[in-house]
Image (tube, helix red, strand yellow):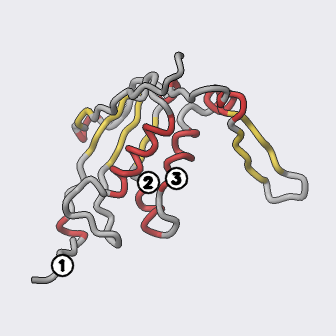
């Protein structure tokens, strides 16, 4: 008997929707990354995209613990000398809700063509509305585990 290896034609990609209201950023990101890779499935194969489509709503209401709203810094560079800019979590959430989640998930996925295909299956929306109702996504509950810190 040989080891099972999934073929791309055999994989069925399902759609899930996650409500990120008052959830901790890292806990949501790790669950999303696991589902995008397909590691929750019995047919997981490392070189085949076995993951599902994930729609995250209410990303503007994600939270981080402790002093991270001000201390967590995101950097980007324009490519020009002296062109580095920094922003913290609070400012990024105000300007671009959901970008912090996208960056967190992207860092948890493989780097390369397969990882780039996986990140395209993540859809993040700051509000409660999303345009993917035609796909009939199933609701995926992520346990709101206590971080030990009150809101």
Q: Residue furthest right?
A: 82
> What residue sits 70% from the left and 43% below the top?
74
Quadrant of residue 10 within the rendered picture: bottom left
> What residue sits 39% from the left and 28% below the top?
145
Residue 65 horizontal side relative to residue 140, left or right: right
Q: Against 75, is 12 above or below?
A: below
Q: Residues within 10 Å of mark 3 (few under 14, many from 20)?
A: some
From the viewer's perspective, is the residue at label 2 or at label 1 nearer? 1
Q: Earlier in the sequence, mark 2 or mark 1?
A: 1
From the viewer's perspective, is the residue at label 2 or at label 3 nearer? 3
Q: Are marks 3 and 1 in contact (CB under 8 Å)?
A: no
Residue 49 horizontal side relative to residue 107, left or right: left
Quadrant of residue 94 within the rendered picture: top right
Q: Earlier in the sequence, mark 2 or mark 3?
A: 3
Q: Label 2, on which residue?
A: 120
From the viewer's perspective, is the residue at label 3 or at label 1 nearer? 1
Report the quarter where the N terminus lies: bottom left
Q: How far apart are labels 2 and 3 at the CA level? A: 10 Å
Q: Secondary structure at mark 1?
A: loop
Q: Secondary structure at mark 2?
A: loop
Q: Label 3, on which residue?
A: 106
Q: Label 1, on which residue?
A: 3
């Amino acid at each position: 008997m040989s080891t099972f290896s999934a073929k791309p034609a055999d994989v069925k990609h399902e759609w899930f929707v996650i409500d990120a209201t008052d959830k901790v950023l890292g806990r949501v990101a790790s669950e999303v990354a696991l589902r995008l890779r397909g590691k929750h499935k019995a047919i997981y194969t490392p070189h085949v995209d076995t993951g599902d489509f994930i729609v995250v709503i209410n990303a503007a209401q994600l939270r981080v613990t402790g002093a991270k709203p001000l201390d967590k810094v995101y950097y980007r560079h324009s490519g020009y000398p002296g062109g580095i800019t920094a922003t913290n979590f609070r400012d990024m959430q105000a300007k671009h809700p959901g970008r912090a989640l996208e960056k967190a998930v992207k860092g948890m996925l493989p780097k390369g063509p397969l990882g780039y295909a996986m990140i395209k299956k993540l859809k993040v929306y700051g509000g409660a509305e999303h345009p993917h109702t035609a796909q009939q996504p199933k609701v995926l509950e992520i346990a709101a585990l206590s971080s030990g810190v009150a809101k």
